Image: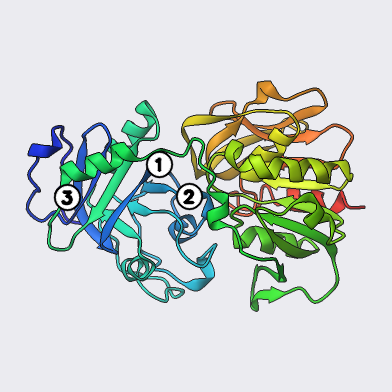
Amino acid sequence: MNSAPTAARRDAADLPVPPGATACIAFADGTVFFGRGFGAEGVSVGELCFNTAMTGYQEIMTDPSYAGQVITFTFPHVGNVGANPEDEETLDPVALGMVTRWDPTEPSSWRAAEGLSPWLARRGRIGIGGVDTRRLTRAVRLKGAPHVAIAHAADGALDPAALVEKARAFNGLTGADLAKDVSCAQSYRWEEMRWAWPGGFEKRATPGRRVVAVDYGAKRNILRCLASAGCDVTVLPATATAEDVLAHDPEGVFLSNGPGDPAATGAYAVPMIQGVLKAGLPMFGICLGHQMLALALGGKTVKMSHGHHGANHPVKELATGKVEITSMNHGFAVDGQSLPDGVIESHVSLFDGSNCGIRVEGKPVFSVQHHPEASPGPMDSHYLFDRFVESMG
């Protein structure tokens, strides 16, 4: 929590590394911020975003939807709850790295199995502390999500000019199909339910509705919510075809969250979704699944300036007027003006009016942009899982 060796300047080729700096983040426009590194050493290149959540940094870092991104945390207290296996949404962190205002604090939670820095180091992910995250956040809001290169060298041997060139060479997320990179390699059954006292994560003991979940980067807690709502879940890879899905004789189909450009992933996902829709099955999508359902129904998606990333996003359900406090993580959005007849906009963001949900008129097919499993409300949106189960009759 000491004063930060932060700098933000141009002309990286002539930029000296400040004393005490062991990490930096370089922008494609030549701006460089210095700080202190933690976690793994090395270099990563991606898109910078900011997340406004006050809790859940481990869940955020392991959310597959963050593939290809570096996360600036606007809340300064990062590291105070440590890290533990129960809070991981996938086996390893997916986000490329994290940027914080202060150096990570030592864990003070009884649930902590280890500190944040060693957890990141074992997973090969870079952390940078001591950075003016407010300035970073303003830059992202004003100019859009920039391309950056981040580096951590414990000996301070940093090359800002080379990092700027790496940032400039990054192709960005538009047109990138990242779902294949984070999806499962083969199908599997999921039985674990949401955490409950005193047993923790218990498994389903009774038969439920047969649901196929297509994994574009599924978070574990989404699958737990499906199981807790009464589903026997079979997870299939992102590249599953309609024939693959229907071969499991499902009563409903779930489309998961995930990273990258929905139009790119839609090249193979949209035909599958359209084939399942023709079979008349109930369908529920979240995040990337929501965007690709919209594409399959004839809508369009757009790249957002800086996206929505946080746990304080108010979303209004138009049919009821109910406002839900939601968790979001997306850099692309469904264009609500592009929805064809028969596809109804069901939810909108009260921050900027962007689309946050759709439903098909007269059919048990719906999706939302936000993450109902993440519980910031804390359970404002859990009804969506029950609605999906009820739609199966």
Instruction: Judge from the rendering whether residue 292 lies leftward or rightward of residue 364; answer left or right.
Output: left
Residue 101 point in image, percent of width and height: 27, 49
Toward the viewer: 104 or 39?
Answer: 39
SS of the residue under disc 2: helix
- Up the image or down, 367 lies above or below 244; here it is above
Instruction: Judge from the rendering whether residue 323 lies leftward or rightward of residue 83; answer left or right.
Output: right
Residue occupied by mark 2 = 66
Toward the viewer: 111 or 58?
Answer: 58
- Up the image or down, 138 lies above or below 371; here it is above
Instruction: Judge from the rendering whether residue 346 lies leftward or rightward of residue 125; answer left or right.
Output: right
Name the residue furthest right: 393
Rendered image: mark on residue 49: 1
Q: Name the residue: 49% across, 35% down.
A: 174
Residue 1 point in image, percent of width and height: 21, 57
Residue occupied by mark 3 = 4
Q: Amino acid at mark 1?
A: Cys
